[in-house]
Image: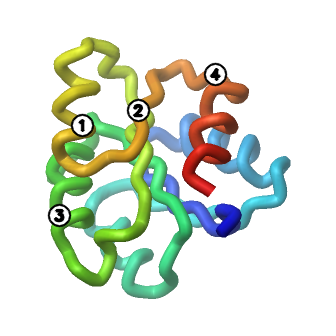
Amino acid sequence: MPIQKVLIVDDSKTELMFLSDLLMRHGMVVRTAQNSDEAMQRLAEERPDLILMDVVMPGQNGFQLTRSITRNPDYADIPIIMCTSKNQETDRVWGMRQGARGYVTKPVDPAELKAKIEALG
């Protein structure tokens, strides 16, 4: 099933605008959340086909939120791509262990992100 609806979780308004614009140009419908509480609210309102998850956020970080979502039976099948400035191999491994299906480092390469999304679709 092609990915149409994407939830972007990031506390940076700049990053939200950049990623939203990028995905909308590819015909996707984008919703955003700036923290874990907003992210869970958006999930309850409308189920996305994909979540792009930042790691460094106030409150619950992206690793913790990814683990919460992937272990919740209602949302476990929604793929998550970590989209973060944390570029160490240990961060990537930890993100995948929390349930992420992909890992992209910032600054995001549009072609790399598009390829990762298409691989999930």
Report which residue position mark 4 lands on: 109
Q: Quadrant of residue 41?
A: bottom left
What residue appears at the point 58 percent right and 65 percent down from the top-left corner?
31
The N terminus sits in image quarter: bottom right
Lower position in the chain sequence, tag 4 or tag 3: 3
Q: What element does badge 2 sit on?
A: strand
Q: How is the image coloured?
A: rainbow
| Residue 14 x, y percent position in the rendering | 58, 36
Residue 95, disc: 1
Q: Is residue 5 visible?
A: yes
C-alpha span from label 4 to label 1 = 19 Å
Q: CA distance from mark 4 to mark 3?
A: 27 Å
Dot 2 or dot 3, earlier in sequence = 3
Disc 2 marks a residue whose amino acid type is Tyr
Is label 1 in contact with label 2 (beta carbons under 8 Å)?
yes
Q: Earlier in the sequence, mark 1 or mark 2?
A: 1
Q: Decide: marks 2, 4 in contact (CB < 8 A)?
A: no
Q: Secondary structure at mark 3?
A: helix
Task: Read off the residue under disc 2.
Answer: 103
Q: Are marks 3 and 1 in contact (CB under 8 Å)?
A: no
Q: Position of residue 47 (x, y in %)?
A: 49, 79
- Spatial CA span between label 2 and label 3: 17 Å
In primary-sequence order, the first of circles 4 and 1 is 1
Earlier in the chain: of badge 2 and badge 4, it is: 2
Horizontal relation, residue 98 to residue 86: left or right = left
Residue type beneath disc 1: Gly
Q: Spatial distance from mark 1 to mark 2, Cα to Cα?
A: 7 Å
Question: Who's the residue at 58% across and 25% down the image?
Answer: 108
- Is the C terminus in the top left, top right, bottom left or bottom right quadrant? bottom right
Q: Amino acid at mark 3?
A: Ser
